[in-house]
Image (cartoon, rainbow, N blue to C red):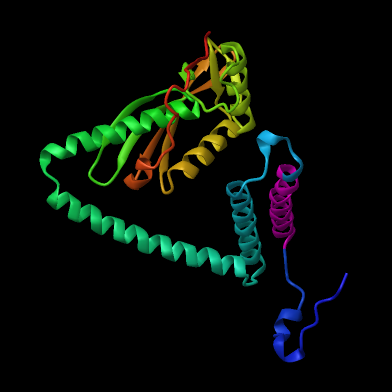
Amino acid sequence: MPRLRLSASAVDPADRLPLSLSDEQKTTLKKATRKVQEHLGMLPFFLDGPADEAMTREKARIVLETVESGLADLGRQLGVDTDAQAAIEQRYGELRQANTRIRELEALLGQQMPVEAIQPALYGMERRLRDWWKLEGLGHVSEVRFNAYSLQVTLSTQMISGRPQLPGAEHLSHAERKALWLASLEQCGFVLIDDDGKCLRDCGSSRDALRKLIGGRLPGAKISQFVSREGDTGSVLTAVEVYIYDLAAVQVLPVPEPKTPEVDADA
């Protein structure tokens, strides 16, 4: 392997000193390194995988941004500035500027929008939330409450039915589509159990999968609490309560395509 050569004037002498790292820090660094390697390993998977898992620009972007974030985290832990960290900070700065502009426009809109136009706008936002949760295949939205600076929602995780996107499943039977739907949830990290129908087990994996899903779709949203009950087979996760602060994110949530068939968990 070729060695990288730097001139003596380009290197701070302090950078040549061994790092003083505790065993805990070393363990954390090794774990973070493995995570970066695992994420980068998704590229060969998509390149060599079946047609339905083929590489796309969207998948490549997600993988590379995840790797970039992991490298920036490693740089912070090691005290080393990286290009990845600089790029992320630049993006965050641009995002903060965009959010500031959105708030300014929202304030202006609030002053100019006639009262009779507000109710349809709120209804449309609530409708999109409900359709999105159906698309994710995790149940229904049981409560929506608009506050002064946020939107409070209770997302049911009792999977009575859903309208998930299942490419290529248009001509499959309901049982086959149901099996694909439940398998897709498990692939996302959800743990399913049988208790009067398909439900989520209240465990770390299911909670982490919900955090990832909600955080990915609704940046800045905060989960206030998980709701569970005891069933015959253990704790069942029945709902998650979320505060949404960026209403613009709601307006771009994905929703099922027209005529997407319903999948019934109990059928």
Predominant SS of the magenta segment: helix
Q: Position of residue 107 (x, y in %)?
A: 20, 54
Furthest toward the right, the residue is 1
Residue in the image at 55% along x and 66% along y: 87
Q: Is 85 placed above or below 107 here?
A: below
Furthest toward the bottom, the residue is 9
- Please indicate whether residue 14 sits to the left or right of residue 57 in the image: right
Q: Is 157 placed above or below 77 here?
A: above
Question: For this rendering, which residue is in front, 59 or 83?
Answer: 59
Q: In which quarter of the image is the N terminus?
A: bottom right
State which quadrant residue 169 falls in: top right
- Please indicate whether residue 187 sits to the left or right of residue 200 in the image: right
* 38 within the magenta span: yes
Q: Position of residue 199 (x, y in %)?
A: 53, 19
Q: Is 75 placed above or below 223 here?
A: below
* 183 within the magenta span: no
Q: Can residue 239 be seen in this view?
A: no
Q: Where is residue 96 in the image (x, y as percent from the top left)?
A: 39, 61
- Please indicate whether residue 153 sits to the left or right of residue 139 in the image: left
Residue in the image at 74% along x and 43% along y: 45
Q: Is 149 placed above or below 190 here?
A: below
Q: Is residue 126 visible?
A: yes
- Please indicate whether residue 146 sits to the left or right of residue 15 in the image: left
Q: Position of residue 117 (x, y in %)?
A: 16, 39
Circle count:
0
Q: What stretch is highlighted in magenta?
A: 22-46
Question: For this rendering, which residue is in front, 174 or 101?
Answer: 174
